[in-house]
Image (cartoon, rainbow, N blue to C red):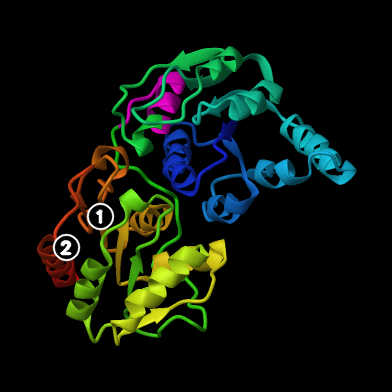
Amino acid sequence: MNILLVRVSSLGDVLHNLPMVADILRHHPDANIDWVVEEGYVSLVRLNPRVRRIIPFALRRWRKSLGKKETCAEIRGFFKAVREEEYDYVFDTQGLLKTGIIMGAARVKKGGRKVGLANGSEGSGYEGVSRIFHTQSIPTDPRTHAVARGRLVAGAALGYALDTRPDFGLPGLEHANRPAWMPAGDYAVFFHGTARNAKKWAPENWIAIGHALAPMPVLLAWGSPLEKAEADTLAASLPNATVLPKLSMDEAVSLARNAALAIGVDTGLTHIAAAFMRPVIEIYCDSPKWKTEGNWSEQIINLGDKGAPPSVAEVLAAVKQLRGMA
């Protein structure tokens, strides 16, 4: 059986789609699974060795040069790659017009099915027009967890129930490399940055946690000039903190994967650390905890909720609990 997964972005959403692979192969071990994903997240999907073929999608880059011949040739090449294989099932678990178009372009065998979401979850960017490309639309509860949504869609189409915790298919720590900029021993990482200000935790809170962790090294990651400035401000008040250089996607994944403790707001890199089963404290300030909380490991502690950020005392208690497990 040949299966194509269409989940192109964003970082956290691609990550949360990974358990579909293990579920499908647990029930259909001979299945071949391909995946269409934004080119910036190819390296993340590649970490799962059970994905046979990855087809890079570059819409974010193509949009900047749609009139150029080279871009048009790339787009044609992309759709040719999507149509190379005939699939038994094509799953679109994003539910957008752009992912529906990709699903529409894919070829299915006689009797094959194109399966997607009948509805979005609360606060999602679901686009109902995507259903015109479906053979089968699977309804889910509007408050379905981001990890469960894709798993439920595949289970409903392929005839199995979910009876295991999510398996992200990621390699264990024993296979991890440590780049030269990474401390040789244990370190904590703060994923303090996020695009939406309301999701951020107050700088003085991070500083208090950093002091409490001393002398343990604290690494500060950033993804934009504003986040770099925020990291510099935190580091100026923390003798044990280091502002990292600009990291590639592979390096950022390695940072999350090797952390002895990761503390972060609701953002992709925090969820990556959780998917690698690291000791993680997820901080929710202005997004609903039910949607993305790490609920598959006792080493993940979720604090706060939409409109109710956690206190420093709550986070310190969680740090004590997780460090006691180490």
Residue 257 image position (x, y, % from top left): 41, 65
Tell me the quadrant of the picture where the C terminus can be found.
bottom left
Placement of 7 over or under 170, stated as above or below: above
Can residue 1 be spotted in the picture?
A: no
Q: In the image, is 164 to the left or to the right of 249?
A: left
Q: In the image, is 117 to the left or to the right of 79?
A: left
Where is residue 59, by image quadrant?
top right
Q: Is the magenta stretch mostly helix, strand or loop?
A: helix
Q: Name the residue under label 1.
A: 283
Circle 2: element type = helix
Q: Which mark is residue 218?
A: none
Residue 155 image position (x, y, % from top left): 40, 25
Can residue 211 be spotted in the picture?
A: yes
| N-term mark: 1 or 2 | 1
Where is residue 194, by image quadrant?
bottom left
Whether residue 156 appears in magenta in the rendering, the answer is yes
Q: In the image, is 31 to the left or to the right of 183?
A: right
Q: Name the residue under label 2.
A: 315
Inspect the image, locate mark 2, and give the three-letter code of the amino acid beneath it: Val
Taking the spot 50% from the left edge, 36% from the top edge, the residue there is 29
The answer to whether the residues at label 1 and label 2 have Cβ atoms under 8 Å apart is yes
Taking the spot 56% from the left edge, 34% from the top edge, the residue there is 5
| Mark-to-mark CA distance, 1 and 2 | 8 Å
Tell me the quadrant of the picture where the N terminus can be found.
top right
Circle 1: element type = strand
The span picked out in magenta is 150-162
Taking the spot 38% from the left edge, 27% from the top edge, the residue there is 152
Residue 136 image position (x, y, % from top left): 51, 13
